Amino acid sequence: QVQLLESGPGLVKPSETLSLTCTVSGGSISNKYWSWIRQPPGKGLDWIAYISHSGSTKYNPSLESRVTISSDTSTNKFSLELRSVTAADTAIYYCARHPHVGGDPFDIWGQGTLVTVST
Amino acid sequence: SYELTQPPSVSVSPGQTVSITCSGDNLERKYVSWYQQKPGQSPVLVIYERFKRPSGIPERFSGSNSGNTATLTISGTQDLDEADYYCQAWDNNYVIFGGGTKVTVL
């Protein structure tokens, strides 16, 4: 059974870089697609980016200039970097799996990790 | 950019049927998924490809899609169905989420 677990700092200072990692267990990241999704407190879901098993990527246009998604098949992890953060980036960050793009759902989600941007 | 519109909230009495709508241009041509999210928990997939239910999702959850509107219907609503529900679709390989609908079981 595939499980996802997010990890990273819970507190990031404004203007710095938010870095998170999603560890995939029970399956390989060398197939399927992998996304980051965030949810500001009390608000809805906002897709950030995905990376494919072959390393191709797609970003939310509203965040593309500040975001990088990457993966490491040797450790079965994928990561998110969000640069120049502000208080508006405070959110629960989820990693999630989807079999393909263009129509497939997010069938497995991590538990989420709260990241607060504050001094 | 493509948008999905959901009503902010709906209410239902236990045992009754509630429908949640999700509107978007030519939505019937897209595969729509629905997620249930309870407070403090991660979203859970309840409907995908417009009307399919993942293993373990009760039959009272059903989906449909016609024209510009996708609909999630909960029949025989139970107290434990009280949650936020999000629709999701793809547009040119970008992911789009609706704003979410809070279902209150009164």
Image (tube, coloured by chain):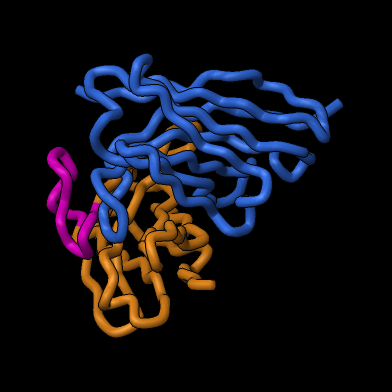
Say which chain is blue. A
Q: Residue at x 50, y 23 (%)?
A: A21
Residue A119 vs A88, above or below: the answer is above
Q: Which residues are magenta?
A: B47-61
Image quarter (top left, top right, bottom left or bottom right) of the C terminus of chain A = top right
Q: Nearer the viewer, residue B8 or B86?
A: B86
Say which quarter of the image contains residue A96: top left
Report the residue that reaches farthest toward the right.
Answer: A119
Residue A6 vs A87, above or below: the answer is above
- Colour in which chain B is drawn: orange
Image quarter (top left, top right, bottom left or bottom right) of the N terminus of chain A = top left
Q: Residue at x 53, y 47 (%)?
A: A48
Q: In this rendering, would A52 be left or right of B55?
A: right
Q: Residue at x 56, y 25 (%)?
A: A20
Say which quarter of the image contains residue A89: top right
Is residue B106 visible in the rendered image? The answer is no
